[in-house]
Amino acid sequence: MNCESKEKKGAAAVIFRETENDREYLILHRILVWKGYEFVKGGIEENENPEDAVKREIIEETCLEKTVVLGKLNKKMLWKSNGCCYDYIVFVAKADENEKVILEDEPQEHDSFEWLTKKKALEKLSHKETRESFESAVKEIEEGRIHA
């Protein structure tokens, strides 16, 4: 990827929960800067490692404090926007099925969320890179390479 200005390193989380009938994945509806569906993600702060960054982002964006990070994908989520290259490590995390999502107020980055089956989540995710990372995470979970 050719970047004219800068590169931003970050971390993202494909979060799932087990319900009585199915496995559901959390997606957020973004309204800050662009509109569409994504999963939890954000930049890595100075002197912060990627796993600590994703744990912080999960709490900041969803208030899910009991979520457990199970592992990370081998493939990063890479994209370019407005002259900036984004290089994000993608983690897989399991949420406590009894814990409620509460979206942050300031700044309001997301206005809603949904817990969806893999098929429905894949249909709603807005960007190719996000869908590819999601599919990789689901495959890792289903094949038992990442588990609780």
Image (cartoon, rainbow, N blue to C red):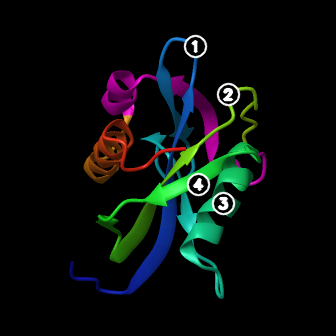
Residue 51 highlighted magenta (yes or no): no
Q: Which stretch appears magenta? A: 104-124
For marks 4 and 1 on the same chain, the one whose residue lies earlier in the sequence: 1
| Pair 3/1: label in front | 1
Tag 1 secondary structure:
loop
- The residue wearing badge 2 is 97
Are circles 3 and 4 on residues that touch, CB within 8 Å? yes
For marks 1 and 2 on the same chain, the one whose residue lies earlier in the sequence: 1
Task: Characterize the local packing of mark 3: few (<14), some (14-19) or many (20 or more) Cα atoms within 10 angstroms.
Answer: many
- The residue wearing badge 1 is 20
Marks 1 and 2 sit apart, C-alpha to C-alpha, by 10 Å
What amino acid is found at the position of numbered circle 2 in the picture? Glu
For marks 3 and 4 on the same chain, the one whose residue lies earlier in the sequence: 3
- Horizontally, is 112 left or right of 7 in the view? right
Q: Which mark is residue 55?
A: 3
- The residue wearing badge 4 is 69
- Quarter holding residue 2: bottom left
- Horizontally, is 65 left or right of 94 in the view? right
What amino acid is found at the position of numbered circle 1 in the picture? Glu
